[in-house]
Image: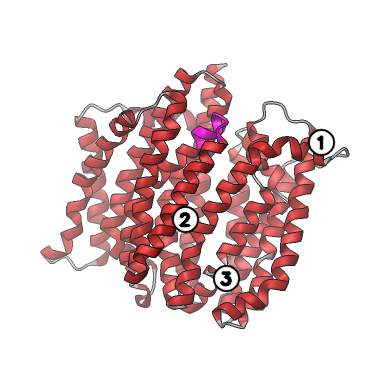
């Protein structure tokens, strides 16, 4: 039984990494092409609408997906009740946003945003039709099908966007990519996941799960508002070109964040939920997840700081050079972001959504305070505040959440600081490589990447850590 769960978890984690990593690779390739077909300011127009789509996606889901995943036994009527709830909320929100679209365009002084937002907001309506199918895949740890669906939808929508951009549709090609990706993904979920709604759906089921889901809803809502408020402020007070630079800096920094954080979190929560109330076993597994995350997260973050200039120079046209310092600053906090994400997984596993809400409220208060304190220093000041908040939030979150399994802050520091120190020693010196006369942009990318990675792994091995062998064993098991 334990071996079966271990193997199933290993396969789920492997496919989750493929899913998140594949999404980032697909996005990387298509943005590389689209940045040469669409002007910089038009990227900014799409970015400022992200806050509305994010809010809608959170409200339509309302935390019920996590509630369904957490439940050991779920009745068909409960799935159907949540399904109809998701669709009803998404349609209601679309109608509201449809009539508010002129207010958005008036706020920014951009008339095109009226029709553009009405089109982009169709994405969250299409998304609502596939939420329950996605829940079924997660509960069964069947990330293989989910990965195939997500990557196929990303490829098809990206090709559509390139075709439209090549034919001069500009910002509408970027909008079409978002809408088509949601539509195709939901369509594929209906094709490959055999679940269908049944009769007997009732608001009673929604009410029964609301005590748990409402706190998650508020938590997610606060997170999305605070995370997406920065493009809104930059677009209003600075320029859409700077919104675009900020957006690409965030996307580039989110490549390691999403692959590591989303990949591990998506498996950590259902894995911990399967353990039950065995706190000692839960603590052992949780500490191992923390160490694996730190082992991957810190060298990746340090490599992004070191390689920001060649990455941006190769990836984007010259007019996007202002992305370089944004990426470097965000990468500092990005090292801690995947670790902070595991705080939520632990508290959801323990059923402490109320404590998670309080921690997230504290984090978002810090974000809002950082805006007030750093706004005067421009975009770089704002992103510096984001990074600092990510660091502080992790240590605050782990201090309070760790009490649920007797996991202390001292133990957390013991688990992560070795990898942070080794990553700094291995990568940071290469930041000054250009001073010795190397100008070839590809050498400035490859030398730090290869030499830094080898040095990092060598130091870890010399110090006697077993994390490398554990990773190798995991990969072997996942590929069986």
Q: Which residues are magenta?
A: 345-352
Q: Earlier in the sequence, mark 3 or mark 2?
A: 2
Farthest residue to the left: give it. 436
Would you identify the image quadrant in which residue 83 lies? top right
Q: Position of residue 355 (x, y in %)?
A: 52, 37
Residue to which mark 3 is pinned:
174
x and y percent of residue 420 in the render? 27, 41
The residues tagged by marks 1 and 3 sit, at their Cα atoms, a distance apart of 38 Å
In front: label 1 or label 3: 1
- Residue, disc 1: 77
**Left or right of 150 on screen, residue 429:** left
Secondary element under disc 2, as helix, strand or loop, is helix
By secondary structure, the bulk of the magenta-drawn segment is best described as: helix
Quadrant of res 1: top right
- Specify whether 459 is left or right of 405: left
Q: Please report contact status of discs 3 and 2: CB closer than 8 Å, yes or no.
A: no
Label 3 environment density (alpha carbons within 10 Å; few <14, some 14–19, many ≥20): many
- Is 321 above or below relative to 209? below
State the residue position of label 2: 25
Residue 343 at x, y = what percent? 46, 37
* Residue plotted at (62% across, 83% down): 111
The kind of secondary structure element at disc 3 is helix
């Amino acid at each position: 039984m334990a071996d079966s769960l271990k193997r199933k978890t290993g396969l789920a984690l492997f496919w989750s990494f493929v899913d998140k990593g594949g999404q980032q690779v697909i996005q990387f390739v298509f943005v590389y092409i689209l940045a040469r077909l669409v002007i910089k300011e038009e990227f900014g127009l799409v970015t400022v609408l992200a806050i509305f789509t994010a809010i809608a996606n959170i409200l339509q889901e309302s935390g019920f997906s996590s509630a369904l995943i957490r439940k050991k036994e779920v009745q068909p009527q409960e799935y159907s009740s949540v399904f109809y709830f998701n669709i009803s909320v998404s349609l209601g929100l679309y109608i509201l946003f449809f009539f508010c679209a002129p207010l958005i365009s008036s706020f920014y002084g951009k008339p095109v945003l009226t029709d553009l937002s009405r089109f982009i907001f169709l994405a969250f309506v299409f998304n609502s039709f596939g939420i329950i199918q996605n829940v079924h895949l997660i509960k069964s740890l069947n990330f293989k099908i989910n990965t195939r669906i997500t990557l196929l939808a990303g490829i098809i929508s990206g090709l559509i966007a390139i075709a439209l951009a090549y034919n001069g549709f500009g910002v509408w090609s970027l909008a079409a990519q978002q809408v088509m990706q949601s539509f195709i993904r939901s369509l594929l979920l209906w094709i490959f996941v055999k679940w269908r709604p049944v009769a007997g759906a009732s608001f009673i089921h929604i009410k029964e799960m609301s005590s748990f889901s409402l706190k998650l809803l508020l938590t997610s809502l606060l997170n999305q508002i605070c995370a997406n408020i920065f493009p809104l402020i930059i677009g209003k007070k600075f320029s859409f070109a700077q919104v675009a630079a900020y957006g690409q800096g965030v996307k580039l920094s989110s490549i390691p964040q999403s692959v590591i954080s989303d990949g591990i979190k998506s498996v950590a929560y259902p894995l911990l939920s399967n353990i039950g109330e065995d706190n000692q076993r839960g603590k052992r597994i949780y500490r191992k997840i923390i160490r694996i995350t730190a082992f991957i997260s810190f060298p990746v973050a340090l490599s992004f700081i070191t390689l920001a200039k060649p990455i941006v120079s190769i990836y984007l046209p010259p007019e996007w050079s202002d992305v370089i310092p944004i990426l470097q600053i965000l990468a500092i906090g990005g090292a801690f972001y995947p670790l902070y994400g595991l705080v939520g997984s632990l508290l959801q596993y323990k059923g402490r959504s109320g404590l998670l809400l309080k921690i997230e409220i504290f984090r978002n208060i810090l974000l809002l305070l950082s805006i007030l304190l750093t706004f005067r220093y421009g975009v770089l000041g704002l992103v510096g505040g984001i990074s600092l908040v990510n660091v502080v939030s992790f240590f605050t979150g782990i201090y309070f959440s760790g009490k649920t399994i007797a996991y202390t802050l001292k133990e957390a520091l013991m688990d992560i600081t070795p990898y942070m120190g080794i990553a700094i020693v291995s990568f940071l010196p290469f930041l000054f490589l250009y001073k010795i006369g190397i100008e070839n942009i590809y050498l400035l990318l490859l030398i730090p990447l290869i030499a830094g990675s080898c040095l990092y792994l060598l130091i870890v091995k010399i110090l006697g850590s077993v994390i490398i062998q554990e990773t190798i064993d995991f990969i072997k098991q996942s590929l069986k």
